[in-house]
Image (spheres, rainbow, N blue to C red):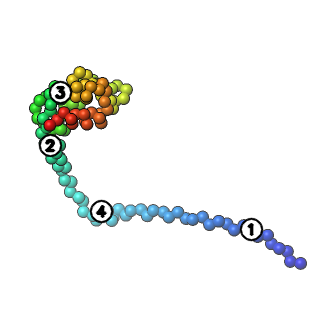
Amino acid sequence: MATKKAKKPAKKKVAKKSAKKPVKKAAKAKMPAKKKVARKPNPAFMKPMQPDDMLGAVVGMKAMPRTEITKKIWDYIKKNKLQDSVNRRMINADDNLKAVFGGKKQVSMFEMTKLIAKHMK
C-alpha cells in the first residue's frame, strides 16, 4: 500500500520592495552652477502711498512705500509693547491704532495689514 504524503501549504511570495538608486555625485558635478541673481523688489510695493490722517498719526504723513509703512507700524507696536504677551500673533490697539483698526481692541497681525491698506491712497 502506498502512503499518501500530506501536502504542505504553499508559501506566499513576498513582493520585493524596489530600492531607490542613489544619485551619483559625479552626475551633479557636471552641471554648471547657476549664477545667483539679486531679487528685484515688486514695483507695486515700492510705489509711494500717502497715509490718511488716522494712519499718519502712527507712521507720519510723508508718502512712503507699503513695506516702509508696515515696518513703521511694527516699530510703533514694539515700542509701545502692544503685542499680546500670551498670543504673540495678536496686536492690542491703543487709541491711535484703534482708529486705524476700525475701533477693534485687538486684531491678528494678518488682519492688521488688511486694515492698514484701507488707510493708504
Neighbours of disc 2 within 10 Å: few (<14), some (14-19), many (20+): few
- Residue 58, horizontal then vertical, whole percent: 18, 27
**Quadrant of the image containing the C terminus:** top left
**Number of marks present in the image shown:** 4
Q: Are marks 3 and 1 in contact (CB under 8 Å)?
A: no
Residue 60 x, y percent position in the rendering: 13, 28
Along the viewing direction, whichever of 33 and 62 lies nearer the viewer: 62
Identified by mark 4, the residue type is Ala
- Residue topped by disc 2: 46
Disc 1 element: loop
Q: What kind of element bears circle 4? A: helix
Amino acid on which disc 1 is placed: Lys
Which residue position holds label 4?
A: 29
Callout 3 crowding tier (Cα within 10 Å): few <14, some 14–19, many ≥20: some
The residue at which mark 1 appears reads as 8
- Residue at (89, 78) in percent of width and height: 1
Q: Residue at x 27, y 25 (%)?
A: 103
Residue under the image location 79 percent in, 70 percent down: 6
Name the quadrant containing residue 108.
top left
> Which residue is tagged 3?
54
The mark nearer the N terminus, 4 or 2, is 4
Task: Inspect the image, locate mark 3, and give the three-letter code of the amino acid beneath it.
Answer: Met
Tell me the distance, in whole angstroms, between the alpha carbons under discs 3 and 1: 88 Å
Q: Are marks 4 and 2 in contact (CB under 8 Å)?
A: no
